[in-house]
Image: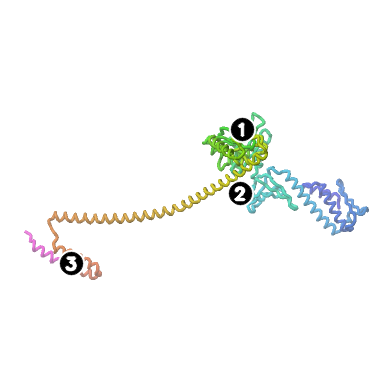
Amino acid sequence: MNPNELLRIVDSLHREKNIDPEIVFQAIEAALVSAAKRQYGEESEITVRIGREDGRIEAHCNGQLLDPEEMIGRIGAQSAKQVIIQKIREAERDSLYEEFEDQIGQMVGGVVQRNEGGASTVSLGNVEAILPRSEQIPGESHHPNERLRAVICDVRSQGNRVKVVLSRTRKQFVQRLFEQEIPEIADGVITINEIAREPGYRSKVAVSSSDQRVDCVGACVGVRGNRIKNIVDELAGERIDIVRWSDDPEVLIPNALQPAEVDQVLLCDMIGRAIVLVREDQLSLAIGRRGQNVRLASKLCGWDIEIMTAEELEDQIERAVAGFCEIEGMDEELAQRLVEQGYLSYDDLSVVEPDALMEMGGLTADQVAAIVDQAEAKAEEAERASAEKRRQQREAERQQAAAAAQAPDEAAADEAAADEAGADENLEAEAGEEAVDQEASAAVDEEFQEATGDEPDAGDETQVDSVSQAESSGAALGDDEQDEMDDATSASAPADDESEIRSNPTP
């Protein structure tokens, strides 16, 4: 084997695969030992040493120097090749694993290759990473050849491959975007102290500035909001609240609850609770849609924040004192002390530290244990009552929904009945109008007869009847018979005219 060729191969693997040259030399030495044992027997003691500088091979079998060209046969060469390939793959896997393990939490860019079952395969150059559906921002979708950015959240070694898992939902992704878009953060002038996030909906970022001349909030927003707009676009329109950080919880909590206005913050250090008092008109704004604002503020500040008005706090204190006094072994003074420390329910009392309760009330360990047991029992009873109330409420809602579903059918039936009644009224009205018309016609005939002084006699009635009968008979006859009748009538017409002239001679 040519020493120069061997050194060139080692250097090429080091550059292309990012593998340590020492690992490559060791792999070749192990392959040569395996090949020599096939040639000289498995029981032979064989050692192979490759010069790191000149690439020369020195091999010994049972203490005797071997010729490198003769110690490897055709079968041995094939075996050595397989060993070298296996060792190089393992070394490449280890190198990739170490490389990406050091980048966990860092942002990388890649190109989407394909989508399978909601998960996206992203090419990072020398490795393919996976962006699971659970790590994608809700509502967004990725298509092949799309460039995207994400943070590395996990690296796993599977056989000869390295599996890299990406995420766009972790809060580290928001932090890396801020560092990339805002130079003051990259320079260390502005510090991101804490981030609370609900991916796809809203994030709160607490920042502080080490330079009093630099406004941390204004620098993050940018001129006309151009900096924060780039971050929001990358996060698929996710809303971002930038909060001014403070080490004082009484200052930080109102900042975290913005845009709501806070009247007072009461800290309960023993249980890590903060009671925030707001006005009635600020209550819904402080809580947020589905409790999102107060939930993110709690994560950001590290306190269990409870929003209420002053009236609600007074009512809750009264109920808590009255409820604690019902517990055997507890007096009103101890109940007041517990309420002052923020214990406002049986659940709070069931998790109280025994030492703290013993110190506050001067109680023994047995008395404290009895009080805690009673509080747990009452808490379970209250939970059952609450569950029953919720069940009744759901049942009432189902009944209302069923009634609402029946309402359209009843309305349709009522409408049909109303239409039928209206039709009957129209028929009655038409009948009434016809009767009125008949009465009016009779009255007109009467007036005409009075004016002319004529009265209908029997002959007129007979003539009317004969005319009507003729009309009816004409209607019943055929066309030929009707024509014959018309000719007969026209033929008799001149005689009538002549007789009329005779009876009325001209003067």
> Dot 1 surroundings within 10 Å: few (below 14), some, or many (20 or more)?
some
Task: Name the residue carrying label 2.
Answer: 141
Count every numbered label the image shows and give the total: 3
Mark toward the start of the polypeptide (1 vs 2): 2
SS at mark 3 in the image: helix
- Residue type, mark 2 in image: Ser
Q: CA distance from mark 1 to mark 2?
A: 41 Å
6 or 313, nearer to the observer: 313
Q: Tell me if label 2 and label 3 are in contact, CB under 8 Å.
A: no
The mark that comes first in sequence, 2 or 3, is: 2
Mark 1 to mark 3: distance in Å? Answer: 120 Å
User: As rendered, which of 178 and 146 lies closer to the eye?
Assistant: 178
- Under tag 2, what secondary structure? loop
Rendering coords of residue 158 (x, y %)? 73, 52
Type of amino acid under label 1: Glu
Q: Position of residue 129 (x, y in %)?
A: 69, 49
- Range of magenta residues: 490-507
Picture layout, residue 210 above or below residue 457: above
Badge 3 amino acid: Ser
Q: Main secondary structure of the magenta part?
A: helix
495 in magenta: yes
Q: Which residue matches tag 3?
A: 490
Q: Residue at x 14, y 66 (%)?
A: 494
Q: Is residue 322 left or right of residue 481?
A: right
Taking the spot 57% from the left edge, 32% from the top edge, the residue there is 264
Q: Residue 406: x and y, percent?
A: 45, 53
Cα distance between the residues tagged 2 and 3:
97 Å
Q: Quadrant of the C terminus?
A: bottom left
Mark 1, residue position: 250
Q: Secondary structure at mark 1?
A: helix
Q: Which of pointers 2 and 3 indicates the residue nearer the eye? A: 2
